């Protein structure tokens, strides 16, 4: 597919959207689905249809963040949000198009939870239907990939990622550009790109949400990476416990292949890249890259000592690039908007934003994306809305079983890629610099 | 592994329990290939359980810290190398919670009795 | 064939090595002994027992000597108070994990685990014995598998797969509940893939695998065949 086809698709899609005066969006990520979002979507669609409102689009979209108060619904943009919506509210919401907002179930979006966030990875989540590639394309999707393969050289793409200062979002925090350039330089007729979606930390659901809400963004990031390092085959290793994410990924891969954005001769060039899905069978250790590779190879999911690192000798002994879901989700915006734009966000040593999954004893449990350098206090008290039942904030357990507990006394320190000795080897976790 | 999950704890949470929960996770998720992670996490879990039940001694706490060091330094992969982190960080910031649960050394175990209160 | 030579230092001694050799091999060639357990010359090294961990200047992590290749200018320390303590604790882990009662073991006096404990000065254990309930599989006409004495070094798994080519053995379960199995967890005696070659028995470092008909301290293992067989196999491939 040539780029003008892509641009035409985007234009046509936007034109269809412009025809509609109103849009009602219902969160259909796992959390809201679990409390009845699908019923709410059907009820609203019926009421809107019954009212004969052909000027209104009703769509299921991705995560809106405030999982504690699902199902969430927005009307004409994120400002008018309804929380804990039930089927009974559908009539009122449909009527609100004429009568003004339904204050009874309205959720205040002027709070820090909505205002203090900065969304790059999650930018599309609350506005596109994850099951339609046209939605993603209308939101500048696959522009980064087509620009890369048509106009730019692989080394130029690697350089862009190096300059962006992006670091791996899976916990290791290794500079992404450096990893890419190692794989790009590694000799070999065959190279692989692997997306690590074996998210297993208790309380973590960032990667699941990204895949459920914006699967094409991850596919595009992988394809750009494959072009940059010279790979022609890719795998997404995802745990089987994420059926919705798997379903949407499979659909997304099919859609992208159909449009010539994945598979043979991407965008009409010589560059070919196909992606396959591999399901994890429930072992946490398969999130470790060498164990993950063993598992893809069909062996028992056990790690091997490094070195050699997968960048030199990985899947089937070929140079292999492994990045986490969130890392790949950052690629398209960096290519689209440039390394300088990305590097201006965050702090001197930690660039960009980080997605966190808030859980436990906190009022606003949910999915947030914040700039690096924000303090723990801002996350817990401002964005998180504090501790329920008037209890005192004691600590945050972050980074799962390989992370540590950050006490309330350190709440004022900024969140960066921790380089200090929080727990003697905390360089594997994202947390405050103690 | 460690990524962006944030579990907020309030004053009612016991940090020994938190450490024990994560150690139970690591113990059951250890693949069993390397010795320090396979056996070390099981021993650390038992010690955390003992201390959590109020049956641990100062010597047990010392053992626990020693095991953390060995498992962290010698495990093959990231799972074992970081498995002690929840224990080490809670020990660093909430040591008193561990110590308040300790019992006096039984007489049959005289080693280091003098350091028990240190 | 063009073999590049690298120089490195092991315990302060400058030594030469061929590129592609492991730290363990180079140390051995120079008379520097590093304790090992899962490693066996002729089998693929896996770095699992962690007894051979060494300090390498510039690396924050300890590296297993059996799997780490030598590089130019590498500075390796194979022996220090810290390493000795770690190795002793790892041995303690092995002893407390299973049920190792030397006095009634067929391999008493001929056991690599026992020998290593003696060498490294492990004279007590600081962690409690776990006393797991484990089975004995005596269904094979000639051999016995006693899980109580198994330390999961997986030498049996590798020799069966890499040398004999039968892949009768594998590991089941995970963590502290891991165990070696034959076929798909069937009794050894009913295994259809086992060729009864006995290599697994002779590479086993402890009394976990032994020949029937041996009593306490009678089971001597013969593994001289291994380097020969692996060379032959390598030449064929």
Image (cartoon, coloured by chain):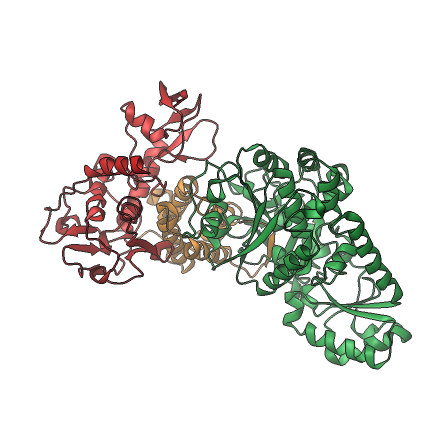
Chain colours: A green, B orange, C red
Query: Hey, which quadrant is residue A254 in on the image?
Result: bottom right
The extreme right residue here reads A98
Q: Is residue A284 above or below residue C237?
A: below
The extreme top residue here reads C14
- How many numbered dots are placed on residues in this image? 0
Coordinates of residue C121 in the picture (x, y in percent): 24, 36
Front-lying residue, C105 or C162: C162
Screen quadrant of the N terminus of chain C: top left
Front-lying residue, A218 or B72: A218
Front-lying residue, A288 or B41: A288
Q: Residue at x 24, y 43 (%)?
A: C124
Coordinates of residue C49 in the picture (x, y in percent): 33, 42
Coordinates of residue A287 in the picture (x, y in percent): 51, 51
User: Visible in this render: residue A416?
Assistant: no
User: Visible in this render: residue A120?
Assistant: yes
In the displayed structure, does residue A289 sit left or right of residue A228? left
In the displayed structure, does residue A184 sit left or right of residue A281? right
In the displayed structure, does residue A434 sit left or right of residue C162? right
Coordinates of residue A214 in the picture (x, y in percent): 69, 57
Query: Hey, which quadrant is residue A350 in on the image?
Result: top right
Q: Residue at x 14, y 55 (%)?
A: C142
Q: Residue at x 29, y 45 (%)?
A: C92
Q: Is residue A371 above or below residue A16?
A: above
Screen quadrant of the C terminus of chain C: top left
Q: Is residue C106 above or below residue A18?
A: above
């Amino acid at each position: 597919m040539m780029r003008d086809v892509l641009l035409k698709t985007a234009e046509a899609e936007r034109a269809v959207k412009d025809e509609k005066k109103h849009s009602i969006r219902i969160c259909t990520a796992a959390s809201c689905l679990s409390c009845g979002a699908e019923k709410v979507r059907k009820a609203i669609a019926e009421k809107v249809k019954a009212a004969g409102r052909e000027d209104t689009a009703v769509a299921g979209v991705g995560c809106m963040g405030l999982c504690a108060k699902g199902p969430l619904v927005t009307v004409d943009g994120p400002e008018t949000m309804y929380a804990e919506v039930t089927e009974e509210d559908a009539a009122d919401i449909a009527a609100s198009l004429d009568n003004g907002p339904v204050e009874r179930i309205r959720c205040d979006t002027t709070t820090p939870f909505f205002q203090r966030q900065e969304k790059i990875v999650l930018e599309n989540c609350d506005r596109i239907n994850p099951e339609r590639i046209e939605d993603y394309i209308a939101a500048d999707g696959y522009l980064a990939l087509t620009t890369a393969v048509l106009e730019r050289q692989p080394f130029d793409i690697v350089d862009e990622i190096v300059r962006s200062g992006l670091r791996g979002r899976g916990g290791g925090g290794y500079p992404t550009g450096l990893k890419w350039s190692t794989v790009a330089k590694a000799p070999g007729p065959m190279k692989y790109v692997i997306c690590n979606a074996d998210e297993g930390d208790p309380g973590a659901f960032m990667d699941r949400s990204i895949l459920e809400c914006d699967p094409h963004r991850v596919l595009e990031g992988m394809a750009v990476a494959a072009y940059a390092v010279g790979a022609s085959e890719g795998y997404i290793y995802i745990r089987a416990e994420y059926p919705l994410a798997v379903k949407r990924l499979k659909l997304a891969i099919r859609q992208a292949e159909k449009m010539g954005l994945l598979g043979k001769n991407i965008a009409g060039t010589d560059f070919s890249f196909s992606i396959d899905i591999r399901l994890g069978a429930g072992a946490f250790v398969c999130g470790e890259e060498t164990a993950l590779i063993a598992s893809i190879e069909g062996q028992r999911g056990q790690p091997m000592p490094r070195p050699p690192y997968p960048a030199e000798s990985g899947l089937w002994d070929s140079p292999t690039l492994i990045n986490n879901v969130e890392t790949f989700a950052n690629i398209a915006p960096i290519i689209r908007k440039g390394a300088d734009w990305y590097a201006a966000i965050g702090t001197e040593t930690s660039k960009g934003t980080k997605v966190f999954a808030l859980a436990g004893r906190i009022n606003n449990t949910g999915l947030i994306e914040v700039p690096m350098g924000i303090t723990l206090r801002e996350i817990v008290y401002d964005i998180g809305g504090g501790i329920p039942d008037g209890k005192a904030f004691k600590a945050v357990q972050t980074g799962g079983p390989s992370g540590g507990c950050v006490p309330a006394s350190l709440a004022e320190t900024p969140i960066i890629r921790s380089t200090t000795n929080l727990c003697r080897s905390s360089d594997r976790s994202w947390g405050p610099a103690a | 592994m460690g990524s962006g999950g944030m579990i907020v704890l309030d004053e009612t949470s016991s940090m020994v329990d938190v450490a024990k929960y994560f150690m139970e996770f690591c113990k059951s998720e250890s693949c069993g290939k390397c010795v320090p992670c396979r056996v070390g996490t099981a021993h650390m879990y038992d010690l955390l359980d003992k201390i959590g039940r109020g049956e641990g001694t100062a010597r047990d706490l010392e053992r626990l810290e020693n095991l953390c060091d060995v498992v962290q330094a010698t495990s093959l992969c990231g799972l074992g190398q970081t498995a002690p982190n929840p224990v080490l960080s809670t020990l660093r910031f909430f040591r008193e919670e561990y110590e308040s649960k300790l019992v006096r050394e039984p007489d049959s175990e005289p080693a280091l009795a003098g350091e028990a209160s240190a | 064939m063009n073999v590049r030579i690298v120089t490195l230092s092991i315990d302060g001694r400058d030594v030469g090595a061929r590129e592609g050799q492991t730290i363990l091999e180079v140390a051995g060639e120079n008379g520097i002994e590093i304790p090992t357990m899962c490693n066996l010359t002729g089998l693929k090294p896996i770095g699992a027992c962690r007894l051979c961990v060494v300090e390498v200047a510039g690396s924050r992590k300890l590296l297993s000597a059996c799997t780490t290749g030598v590089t130019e200018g590498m500075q390796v320390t194979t022996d220090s108070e810290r390493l000795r303590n770690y190795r002793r604790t790892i041995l303690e882990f092995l002893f407390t994990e299973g049920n190792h009662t030397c006095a009634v073991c067929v391999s008493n006096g001929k056991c690599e685990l026992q020998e290593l404990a003696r060498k490294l000065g492990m004279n007590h254990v600081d962690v409690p014995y776990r006393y797991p309930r484990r089975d004995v599989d005596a269904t094979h006409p000639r051999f016995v598998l006693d899980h109580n004495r198994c330390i999961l070094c997986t030498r049996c798994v590798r020799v069966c797969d890499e040398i004999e080519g039968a892949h009768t053995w594998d590991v089941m379960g995970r963590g502290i509940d891991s165990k070696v199995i034959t076929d798909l967890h069937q009794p050894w005696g009913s295994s259809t893939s086992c060729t009864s070659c006995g290599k697994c028995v002779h590479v086993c470092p402890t009394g976990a695998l032994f020949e029937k008909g041996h009593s306490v301290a009678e089971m001597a293992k013969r593994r001289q065949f291994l380097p020969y067989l692996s060379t032959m196999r390598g030449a064929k491939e």
